[in-house]
């Protein structure tokens, strides 16, 4: 899988694993919405590719389930509020 934030490559050839990948990403405050997109590079042994993303921000935690294959990508949009 590859991971993009606002069309910028963040991770390439990411292999999903039982161990979590921890990323700290800075969102662009000048954009009304920041887009995080997960692309499937292969389907692995059991398609589709799935991932659980945990987002922590300002004391709140969100669990987001992502699924992607060769026909559709997974995208999460972050709208910043003050």
Image (cartoon, helix red, strand yellow):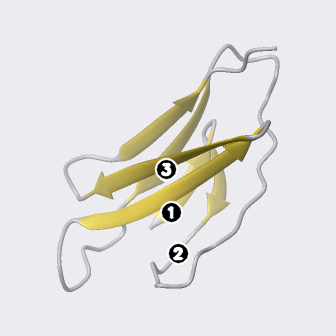
Q: Residue at x 38, y 52 (%)?
A: 65
* The C terminus sits in image quarter: top right
Q: Nearer the viewer, mark 1 or mark 3?
A: 3
Q: Residue at x 41, y 56 (%)?
A: 39
Lower position in the chain sequence, tag 1 or tag 3:
1
Residue neighbourhood size for the residue with mark 3, other residues' Cα within 10 Å, grouped as few (<14), some (14–19), many (≥20): few
Report how far apart the C-alphas of labels 1 and 3 lie in the structure. Answer: 20 Å
Report how far apart the C-alphas of labels 2 and 3 lie in the structure. Answer: 20 Å
- Which of the pair 75/9 is nearer the observer? 75
Q: Position of residue 46 (x, y in %)?
A: 17, 79
Q: Position of residue 22 (x, y in %)?
A: 69, 68
Q: Residue at x 81, y 17 (%)?
A: 30
Residue neighbourhood size for the residue with mark 2, other residues' Cα within 10 Å, grouped as few (<14), some (14–19), many (≥20): few
Residue 14 tag number: 2
Which of the 4 image quarters holds residue 31? Answer: top right
Q: Position of residue 62 (x, y in %)?
A: 55, 44
Marks 1,2: beta carbons within 8 A: yes
**Residue 35 vertical position relative to residue 39 in the rendered view, above or below:** above
Lower position in the chain sequence, tag 2 or tag 3:
2
Q: Secondary structure at mark 2?
A: loop
Left or right for 27, reference 64:
right
Q: Secondary structure at mark 1?
A: strand
Residue 2 tag number: 1
**Residue 21 vertical position relative to residue 23 in the rendered view, above or below:** below
Which of the 4 image quarters holds residue 5? Answer: top right
Residue 63 tag number: 3
């Amino acid at each position: 899988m590859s991971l993009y934030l606002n069309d910028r490559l963040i991770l390439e050839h990411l292999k999903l694993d039982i161990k979590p990948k921890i990323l700290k990403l800075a969102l662009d405050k000048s954009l009304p919405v920041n887009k995080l997109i997960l692309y499937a590079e292969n389907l692995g042994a059991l398609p589709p590719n799935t991932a659980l993303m945990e987002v922590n921000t300002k004391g709140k935690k969100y669990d987001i389930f992502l699924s992607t294959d060769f026909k559709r990508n997974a995208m999460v949009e972050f709208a910043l509020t003050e």
